[in-house]
Amino acid sequence: MNMNDDVFLFLLSVGVLFAALIFAYLLRASRMSHAQHARLADALAQITRSPELSSGILEDAAKIIARTGCATLNTSRVGIWRISKEDAILRNITTYSMSTSMSTGTYGTQPDFNISTPGAGEYARLLASERQVAIENAAQPNVLTDILAGYGPQICAMLDAPIRVEGKLAGVLCIEQDRCAAFPVKREWSIAEQDFASSLADFMAIALTSAEHRMLADQTEEMMNNLPGMVYRYRNDPPNLTMTFASCGSLPLIGYPPEELVGGSMAKIMETMVHPDDLAAMGKQHEETLFRGLPLESTFRIRLKDGSEKWLWERIRIIETAEDGRPYLFEGFCTDVTEQRRLKNQRSELQSHILNLQGTVLQTIAELVEYRDTVTGGHVERTRLFLERLLESMAMRGIYTEEFLAWEANLFLMSSQLHDVGKIAIRDEILMKPGALTDDEFEQMKQHTVLGVEIIDRISEKSPSNTFLEYAKVLAGTHHERWDGTGYPYGLKAGDIPLMGRLMAIADVYDALRNDRPYKKSLSHENAVNILRQGSGTQFDPELIQVFLSCEENFKSIQTGETRRMQRSVL
């Protein structure tokens, strides 16, 4: 069903309602004289035939109803009021007033009326609960005495019919009679006239509803035309997939105006415009989502008439299903994301370049550290690989998952290359000493952790908010802390030691045990594993030691492979 179908059904329902209103009026008016019946029935028929009633323009419909009502009842004025949704104010849409001679009339408006004031409270209650408020002699005390005082002595009688929409008070139709030769003191409102007033109010309710529909339709059309893209609908009638609606955005987006698209085949449009490399994927997406009752979001390329290409983002949903449950009518929106795509690719290329540059700088610094500390050749690369195995095992075992999954793993592994950067600031005679260090020399060597933090801090001053430097600072400062709090430089204990530092401690110690140092020979893999196992709960995090033991064969393979590589390079 397209938008024209919706309008047709709405107009049909309005026509049926008109017929029902007239029938109800005729039923109520069966006791009237034939002349009265004909005059009032003709007036209602005249309103029914007027195009203004269903045009959706509220003022036009109100003028027709007010003028016809005023002329038919030979009364002084008919005013139509609408209640503001924001407050309890009756706002006049229009008022039609007859001349003294009752031969001509004019349109005008009356001031707003606040029905929440004390004097109007009873009037407001009657409008909300009763069919009508009828005053036949304004001079006698009545429920509207306070209100009628504002009209002056010329007012004779009043007949007010509430306007209700969906059961709620939406306004009021006011029929006012001034004193004149025909009605010098009062005017008795006949049942026929009261029924006629109610019918006028019912017509006004239809006009209000039509105006709401028109306003919503106008707003929707304006919104669609202002969208940076195209709104469309098409039927699920293979093989065509007939388009039933397209917004004005189709012309700037894909080069076709709506009139060239509506009634055409969506399938043929896709075959003609979608990039050949994307067409098969789009078809598969439709099969896996839309035709199974799910919404679809996709990004694809199209080729325009002039040969240029655009990237489009599209979202399609099902808005109507057939009796057998199959999707019948789809509604979609697509917009140009070519520039966003270009910027995204540009950002990705820039980020890749930055990461490569960071990696090169880190590797250079790490090689500089190893160049000065000749006894630890390959240490930085091996510890990075050890950390990678530990992260994989942690994920498999579910250890500290929530914490380490919040990291940027690649940056963490890259940053590990700076864990010993502080050794650059250690004097050569200590760093390169061939024998064991004295106690004083060892204390100076321990300062490489604090010095590393200071070096990274100085770099960070020129690179604010740099994640990999933040990671590197943690690793440099905490990889010699111990679980029992006896480590250095800060003496942190257990969970106070950052997880990054606890991981680095295991990788660092294993590598130190497995390689020659001036003060010791390398240990076998088995002995190194036993030492780390014995350090569980004292030097190392017990849970991380269990992670290490689950992947210690990977550590052995990394160490063995590195040793063979170094031996080949020496040969």
Image (cartoon, rainbow, N blue to C red):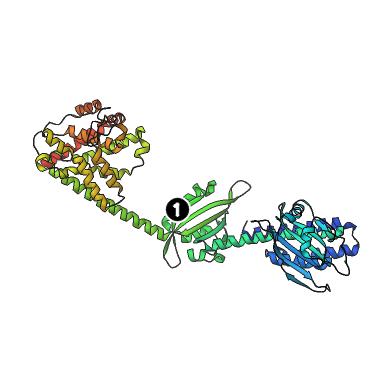
Q: Is residue 293 above or below residue 179?
A: above
Q: Categorize mark 1 by other alpha carbons within 10 Å: few (<14), some (14-19), many (20+).
A: few
| Quarter the N terminus occupies | bottom right
Residue 278 visible here: yes
Name the residue rendered at 12%, 31% in the picture.
521
Q: Secondary structure at mark 1?
A: helix
Q: Position of residue 466 (x, y in %)?
A: 30, 49
Name the residue rendered at 15%, 45% in the picture.
425
Q: Which residue is mark 1?
A: 280
Q: Position of residue 438 (x, y in %)?
A: 10, 33
Q: Position of residue 224 (x, y in %)?
A: 55, 61
Residue 16 or 113: which is nearer the viewer?
113
Figure quadrant of residue 30: bottom right
Q: Position of residue 444 (x, y in %)?
A: 15, 38
| Quarter the C terminus occupies | top left
Residue 299 or 73: which is nearer the viewer?
73
Figure quadrant of residue 435: top left
Relative to 261, 373 lies left or right: left
Figure quadrant of residue 261: bottom right
Number of marks in picture = 1
Relative to 499, 367 lies left or right: left
Q: Is residue 164 above or below residue 507?
A: below
Residue type of the residue flagged with mark 1: Ala
Relative to 363, 43 lies left or right: right
Name the residue rendered at 17%, 42% in the picture.
423
Residue 262 visible here: no
Residue 424 or 249: which is nearer the viewer?
424
